[in-house]
Amino acid sequence: MAQLDDDPCLLGRERELADVDVFLSRAEADGAALLLTGDPGVGKSSLLDAAARRAAAAGVRVVRTGGVEYETDVSFAGLHQLVDRLADELVQLPAPSREALQVALGLDSGPAPERLTVLQASLALLRRAADEKPLLVVIDDMHWLDRATASVIGFVGRRVGGSRIGLLGATRPGAGGFFERTGWPELGVRPLDDDDAMELLAHQFAHLPTRVLREVAHEAQGNPLALLEFAAAAGHPRADPRAASGSTAVTVREVRSLYATRIGRLPAATRRLLLLAALEGSGSLAALAESSASAGLSGLDPAERDHLVLVDERSGEIRFRHPMIKSVVVELSTHDDRREAHQRLAEIFPDQPERRGHHAAEAAEAPDEAVAAIVEEGAQRTLRRGDVVGAVTRLLRAAELSPQRGARSRRMAHAAFIGAFAAGELKSSSQLLREAKRRDPTLGETLEAAVATAYMLLNSDGDATVAHRFLTAAIDTALAEPDHDRDALSRGLYTLVVMCHYAGRVDYWEDYDDLVARMGTSAPADALLLTETFAAPLTASPSMLAALDRQIEQLDDTLDVERIIRTAIASFYTDRLAGCRHALDRVARDGRDSGAAASALMALSMMTFDDLAAGRWHAAERTAADAGALADTLGYRLYDSSRTYATALIAARRGDLEVCTAESEAMLAWAVPRQLGRLEDFANHALGEAALGAGAFEEAYAHAAAIGRPGSLHTHDPQALWSAWDLVDAALHTGRSDEARAHAEALHAADPGRLSARFAMVAAAARAMVAPDDTTADLFDDALGIPGIEAWPFDLARARLAYGERLRRLRRTRDARVQLEAARDGFDRLGARLWSRRASAELRATGATRRAAAASGVGGVDSLTPQELEVAQLAAGGLKNREIATRLYVSPRTVSAHLYRIFPKLGITSRAALRDALGDTSSANTR
């Protein structure tokens, strides 16, 4: 059989190498990932080497990294190896990506990057490295990658399409570890068959008798490493006879036994050096020399001569010839040997808190506050580098090492705090917090515990009352401390903003404003932004709105997930979500892969409202469904209310009254017992719009008035701003002219037009609706002439409907038809069935002939005169005869006469049946 790649270890690998060649071609053309799987010693590393040689020969750039068994808890250890080899490309990245990677790898200091930020920056780095020529990244021992690097490799592997990046890795089946190879193609590496095994042995050990080679081949079961090691042992003068194994598992165990024998024969000084090298993990000769102190590196010679290690002085690295050797070195050591080695290693990393903490913890024999403090310092560094899970792991280790109950509980609470905020792990964080409080009842007084508890209470139980009480107290206490934790305080204020918003209580906002005022200019910038734009958009200053606009302009260039989410939240009530859309798409698309599921949920919720406002209602429904599924997975009950609200609004505008009612009642059932007033506003807003579309104006007025008192717009109630037009519309249609006029004037005085074109149009249209007859048309024309209002098609159609209604009552029939037809067509395009019915009814009242498409149905409604149809609509909306008479400028007796003729035409006998009769027929006519 022909020898491949001039490497006898690759005999019998034609199939695997052919598959590798296909992978390399695909990767060079359009990007690809491939994972080699197989038992230890089966030849995965040899195939990786062969692939690297072939790629390099074809002009592909090759970089390598790999997992290290004893560095699985050192965050980004594997990524660090990779980035070191791409230093030239790193400096070419845009500043946000470059800084995120530098901070994550400990190469620079700065604010902690979000996990998704680091993932996207890593992908950007590899794409930059593949600009000039294709890139192949080779990763051995992926089952031993640290968690942070594993997430990067998995993330990149699912996004290499369209690039010239190849990812080629190797792992053991069933080895566990952090790497999740979802979506990666796999190539299983099988043992050699008998003929190939004998050829390999004959090539390497020609001096051994054929009988011995056959026995070795039988024992090794086709495992190349076992073949070579067994044959070498058989040729050793002190070799022991070996029984046939009969299974791969036993074969591997026998190979380990051979390594143990060889290592056991080494001098004690050599074994100590190998143990230091195995536990240090990076392969640095400099680190090994420093940790060995006066012993130096001369003791490595026996291990190098026995082909256990390879020492490369040019690169300054030592490499074990097989990972199994490293494992055996550690297994043969004693507990005291390992403690001494870890202690030495801890001493050589004074400026690397994570590594120092890791080794110090492994060297500790009992709880020790000094060691716990070192580990906690490492956890803080890990968090600043964006590895949330790694930080939680280190904090829990620090808690275990804490001899004092208070310190242990505090560290557990801190772990819960960052876990809940950054990873969305409500359940596990809640368990941690309960355990910490059980150990130390005074823990709840700390800011970390208060914020974590408040966040979890809000998003799971929705208990704003309790959460507000102890969170405000904790922030108040923290502000009195000269060296308070600014990061914890920032998250505390953010949580308080969210809490105050959902609670919808004025006294909560007063407490919040007092806290922010005490901080003055030292308040975190993001807290100040949310204070003005999200909490009280009606009073947002021009400078803060300008700052928000600048921040939105920079979103496409930022990978900071927290900044994207908080900017979008600030944009929610200021009509700027469209500017955040591309960034939100990224967060939603990549958030679940990166572990930033909570951020993905919030992004999906805001994308839903962006689609809703822009008239993309089908897209809004799909996005809302995705948000609901994720909220259910995470247990985020409160954040799911935004999805429910959006779903109810979509249904309200479409005229799906059953869906709107069901979603709104679900919100109310959860919100009312928890005193979450904003969720009640959500429900009332959706139900009010549904009632307006259906012509049930008394019901619409009740819902709108429940959100905001007529004639008043509270600064900290942005929901009242959203429903202000509903209140004016419903008040006018129920004969409450004074209330309608007062609310329209309050809206005008608030000047919401400085927030957006939509609010400018809404305020102008509301004012036109209550204006005197001689000025109303000019005001409506001004409203419809505002640039940019086409971005809000539903609101634009509503404005045209209101204009047409007013023109018809002024008997300007021809002008009314123009506006009403435009309104009807706008509603039809959106699928706003009941609103289209309102516009069509007004059109018929002008004497206009219904469109063929709208008149295709049959039923009693077609037999009604325009006047009868208008009376029927108003009666179906709940108005009494006298109220209808006032609206239509006729006598109550005339209204009664109309109803007397209407009932038999519709086949009904009571007013209660009017709504169904009109709705059913309308539904048929608009299909």
Image (cartoon, rainbow, N blue to C red):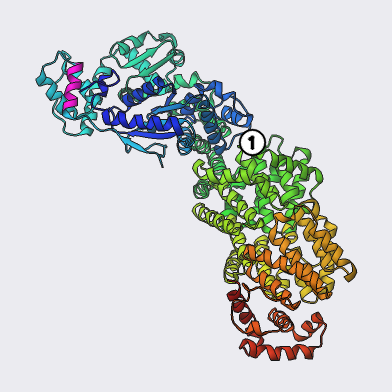
Q: Name the magenta segment's main secondary structure.
A: helix
Q: How many marks?
A: 1
Task: Find residue 71 and report its image quarter.
Answer: top left
Q: Is residue 285 left or right of residue 240?
A: right
Where 564 falls versus 238 (above or below)?
below
In front here: 92 or 112?
92
Q: Is residue 300 left or right of residue 469?
A: left
Residue at image x 16%, y 28%? Answer: 194
Residue 901 appears in the figure: yes
- Residue 305 colored in magenta in the image: no
- The quadrant of the rendering that contains the N terminus is top left
Q: Amino acid at mark 1?
A: Asp
> For the view shown, which residue lies furthest in the right direction?
774
Give the left or right position of residue 155, taking residue 238 as reference: right
Where is residue 596 drawn, in percent x and y? 54, 43
**Residue 196 lies in the magenta-colored region:** yes
The residue closer to the viewer here, 805 or 584, is 805
Residue that numbered label 1 is attached to? 557
Task: Pick the quarter of the image with the C terminus.
Answer: bottom right
Choose between 447 and 797: the one closer to the eye: 797
Q: Secondary structure at mark 1?
A: helix
Which residues, given as a range, are shown in magenta? 195-204
| Residue depicted at x 64% and y 84% | 912
